[in-house]
Image (spheres, rainbow, N blue to C red):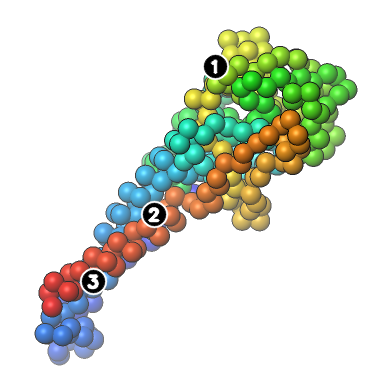
Amino acid sequence: MDSETAPSGDPGDGLGAGDGAEQEEPEEGGRRQRSFWKELPLLVIIALVLALLIKTFLVQAFSIPSDSMQNTLQRGDRVLVDKLTPWFGSEPERGEVVVFHDPNNWLEGEPTPDPNAVQKFLSFIGLMPSAEEKDLIKRVIAVGGDTVQCEKGGPVKVNGKALVEPYIYPGNTACDDKPFGPFKVPDGKIWVMGDHRQNSYDSRWHMDDATKGFVPVDKVVGRAVVVAWPVTRWATLPIPDTFDQPGINTTAAAALGAAPLGLGLAGALPLVLWRRRKLTADRG
């Protein structure tokens, strides 16, 4: 898997009948209705709090930094990542595109951008990915308990079933540059590969380090469910049909397709309107 100022004063405050400004209509009983502009700061605060909670527990935006997932994802794409399902004990499924924390210096030597204050704030509320975290995005090929392998000139096989992989970058082979297996994926681990196979330092290239190429499930941030930006590339990221064949069963995780701030606003507006009605009723 980036605010608009509003008038701070009440239009009717401090103006008499001879000031040439339109006065607010009195409510029943002679009391004036509170101005919407006085409620706006509360709306913004609630929206930001909800956006932060959504980013922490539900959805977060991430930017694609490389070409390793072409053509499914392009460099610069923004994806929304579902962070909710792992909280309910759901583990990554075969075929999912997932974001995970660097398991063991897989990104060693990669530069870390130095974000400015605005970028840090937008990252804090979930509108931009964090530039300070080193995360990767790959496709889950096998999960704990699976046997996975790929011989030169052949397809990737999971539990003896050959995968038909239409998502692989045109002109690439399944694994000719780095054959592997067969071996069994340990419980609590996943085997990941990029869609641009000849341009992806994925599990295959880390078989000799401490991780043995496997990514611990507890390192997974969540599943990328939709390409949200640019709008011309908007698309969902479903599990390919090849993982549905007998012997390779999957259960698709729930997809959340809305940005944190949008959900925050949607949740904040009803609360503010309810509060206004309650204040009006109390004054009446």
Specify whether 116 is left or right of 213. Answer: left
Disc marking residue 264: 2
Residue 153: x and y, percent? Answer: 88, 22
Mark toward the viewer: 3 or 1: 3
Which residue: 61% across, 41% down? 252
Q: Is residue 12 above or below residue 156?
A: below
Seen at 66% across and 32% down, the residue is 94
Q: Kindly identify which residue carries mark 1.
A: 104
Q: Which mark is residue 218?
A: none
Q: Which residue is drawn at 61% across and 56% down?
A: 231
From the viewer's perspective, tell me whether residue 58 is left or right of residue 204.
Answer: left
Q: Where is residue 218 in the image (x, y as percent from the top left)?
A: 49, 25
Compare marks 1 and 2 and give the one earlier in the sequence: 1
Residue type at mark 2: give it.
Gly
Residue 259 showing in the rendered view: yes
Mark 2, secondary structure of its residue: helix
Mark 1 belongs to which amino acid?
Answer: Asn
User: Dot 3, how many residues are within 10 Å of its Cα: few (below 14), some (14-19), or many (20+)?
Assistant: few
Relative vertical location of residue 182 with respect to residue 267 in this rendering, above or below: above
Closer to us: mark 3 or mark 2? 3
Residue denoted by label 3: 277
Q: Which residue is drawn at 15% across and 90% down?
A: 18
Quadrant into which the C terminus falls: bottom left
Gap in angstroms between the C-alphas marked 3 and 2: 21 Å
Q: Is residue 182 above or below residue 36?
A: above
- Mark nearer the N terminus (3 vs 2): 2
At label 2, counting other C-alpha atoms closer than 10 Å, the crowd grade (few under 14, some 14-19, many 20 or more) is many
User: Residue 74's spot in the image, x, y percent?
Assistant: 67, 42
Q: Find the distance from the CA under tag 1 to the CA under tag 2.
A: 35 Å
Residue type of the residue flagged with mark 3? Arg
Give percent across and percent down for residue 64: 60, 38
In the image, taking residue 252 as reference, residue 8 lies left or right, namely: left
